Image: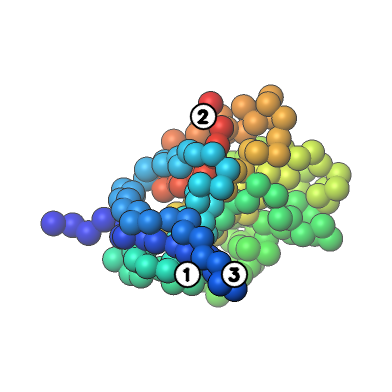
Amino acid sequence: MTQPYLKFEQIGMRFRRGQMSTEVLRDIDLIIDKGEFVSLIGHSGCGKSTLLNILGGLLQSTTGEVFLEGKVVDDPGPDRAIVFQNHSLLPWLTVYGNVAIAVDKVFGKSKSKEERHDWVMHNLELVQMAQAKDKRPHEISGGMKQRVGIARALAMQPKVLLMDEPFGALDALTREHLQDSVMEIHARLGNTVMMITHDVD
């Protein structure tokens, strides 16, 4: 039997503050195949983001383990890129610079400067932001910022793309366009995606 690509095994999470203890997750078992797009849907405060942060290596679960390609996930790494609700762009860098910083970090030793430039532009083109490459975050809209955040995450060539309410702060029309774009990108790349949302649509 082949091992699962991504596996959550008996994940439990408790947060403690002084004498108080709050159980957020209990006995979560989940298997995600390579290339699947999985959405976790639930109301605010039900533990969706906690589960995503455990997979991202940002939180250590109280019980259980996460396995990616058979290896235990216990810290952050470039094999799991996260797109947050807040775009998290660096304001002093251009659109190009915000993607290039991730590309240089992940591929600084394995790709030449020219190859890294081409890869940044390729990912900006994927999200239709190549024309805005010289703009800074304050010069572009919220939807455009989120596109850049997605380009930066994709440019790292992660094994799993994690999206935490990526469209939550956007207006309905922009959200719809961006959802369509993400689905098109997924269909083209066949990457593994786990998305958190409370928006059933």
Query: Callout 3, which amino acid?
Result: Arg
Give the labeled residue for mark 3.
17
Q: Nearer the viewer, mark 1 or mark 3?
A: 3
Q: Residues within 10 Å of mark 2 (few under 14, many from 20)?
A: few
Give the labeled residue for mark 1.
60
Check contact, mark 2 vs mark 3: CB within 8 A. Answer: no
Name which residue lies at 26% across and 56% down: 4
Residue 144 shows up from this direction? no
Q: CA distance from mark 1 to mark 3?
A: 16 Å
Q: CA distance from mark 2 to mark 3?
A: 33 Å
Name which residue lies at 45% across and 62% down: 13
Earlier residue among tags 1 and 3: 3
- The part of the image, by quadrant, that contains residue 145 is top right
Name which residue lies at 84% across and 60% down: 92
Given residues 113 and 7, the one toward you in this image is 7
Query: Callout 2, which amino acid?
Result: Val
Residue 55 x/y as whole percent: 45, 60
Determine the secondary structure under disc 3: strand
Determine the secondary structure under disc 1: loop
Query: Callout 1, which amino acid?
Result: Gln
- Disc sitting over residue 171 in the figure: none
Question: In the rendered view, would you say 183 is above or below 138?
Answer: above
Residue 188 x/y as whole percent: 45, 38
